[in-house]
Image (cartoon, helix red, strand yellow):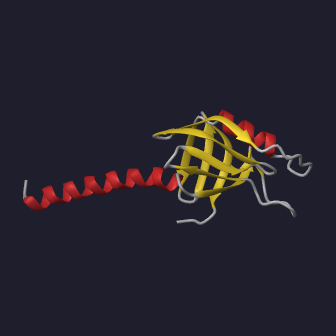
Amino acid sequence: MSWRVRFALVLAASLGALGACDGEAALEDRDWTLVALGGEPVSATAHRPAPNLRLVSDDGQMRGFAGCNRMFGDYTLEGTRLEFGPVGATRMACSDAPSEPAFMAALAATKAYELAGSVLLFKDGATVLARFEATQPD
């Protein structure tokens, strides 16, 4: 095998490995806005922004806004497996945040994620629990 063919194979393998790292890097340390929950659209209200979250790679913490309350908790990420530990939240009472309990339940049920560009899905098996869009796409 010529040195050019070997070089091309090594280069292709290296770029492939870098591409695999980009998936996790793009998932973490980005702001994600919830756009659908259980197949139903979710959006901001007149008085509140849309629910959102951020997975922080430095400390393995999830931080976000559930629709009324700020939320936080641990997460575990291995390949495409994603699970959340107990989620804590502030305790404000809001009558105009009907999706908040369902959002918290979706986080608790999440077992995996799927990422395609600026779209993020939280899944339990084949079931899509929540759909997010990157606040600032790549």
Q: x, y (%) of residue 100?
A: 80, 45
Tell which residue pokes out farthest to the right in this image. 95
Vertical arrangement, residue 133 with respect to residue 57, above or below: below
* Residue drawn at the location 92% of the way across and 48% of the way down: 95
* Residue 87, picture quadrant: top right
Q: x, y (%) of residue 83?
A: 58, 36
* Residue drawn at the location 13% of the way across and 55% of the way down: 6
Vertical arrangement, residue 66 with respect to residue 111, above or below: below
Vertical arrangement, residue 31 with respect to residue 104, above or below: below
* Residue drawn at the location 56% of the way across and 43% of the way down: 113
Depth check: give the residue in front, 77 or 116: 77
* Residue 49, picture quadrant: bottom right
Q: Is residue 113 left or right of residue 2?
A: right
- Numbered label tally: 0
Tell which residue pokes out farthest to the left in this image. 2
Q: Is residue 8 left or right of residue 60?
A: left
Q: x, y (%) of residue 2?
A: 7, 58
* Residue drawn at the location 58% of the way across and 44% of the way down: 61
Q: x, y (%) of residue 96?
A: 90, 52
Depth check: give the residue in front, 77 or 59: 59
